[in-house]
Amino acid sequence: MGQEDRRYKVSEEVLDRNIGDDLLVHRFDNDEVFVFNAHARIVFEAVKSGGTRAEICRYVAEKGYGDDEAVAAVDRALKEMLDQGLALVDDGPLT
């Protein structure tokens, strides 16, 4: 499976709650808390729905963030979510 074909999902160790335009994300396995701005919140919502990078970018673009800078921000947000254990590569079967 190539990097573009990877599917992403949110870790089962994560709970999230909307607070205005922001999103509070809590990793209950280690008690870390993160606050996402509106753009990162949209990326998180896309990852939560599951999908490839292209699908995540498409979801974010549909929310009004489709320029090159926004796509680069998607990549940064996705990398940070992976690094922090909030998002995972979904190796399960496609449904």
Image (cartoon, rainbow, N blue to C red):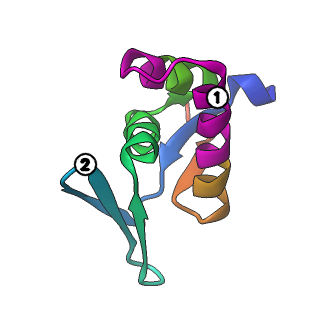
Determine which quarter of the picture holds residue 83.
bottom right
Residue 92 horizontal/vertical position (percent):
56, 37
Mark 1 sits on what residue? 69
Q: How many C-alpha atoms fall within 10 Å of the one at disc 2: few (<14), some, or many (≥20)?
A: few
Determine which quarter of the picture holds residue 71.
top right
Looking at the image, residue 12 sits to the left or right of residue 55; the answer is left
Name the kind of residue labelled 1 in the image: Glu
Is 68 colored magenta in this rendering? yes
Residue 21 horizontal/vertical position (percent):
25, 48
Mark 2 sits on what residue? 21
Per the rendered image, the range of residues in magenta is 59-78
Determine which quarter of the picture holds residue 36.
bottom left
Residue 67 horizontal/vertical position (percent):
58, 18
Position of residue 40 relative to residue 18, above or below, is above
Name the kind of residue labelled 2 in the image: Asp
The secondary element bearing badge 2 is classed as: loop
Residue 75 horizontal/vertical position (percent):
67, 38
Can residue 95 be seen here? The reply is no
Looking at the image, residue 42 sits to the left or right of residue 87; the answer is left
- Residue at the (78%, 30%) spot, across then down: 3
Residue placed most toward the observer, 20 or 34: 20
- Residue at the (42%, 33%) spot, across then down: 46
- Residue at the (51%, 59%) spot, across then down: 86
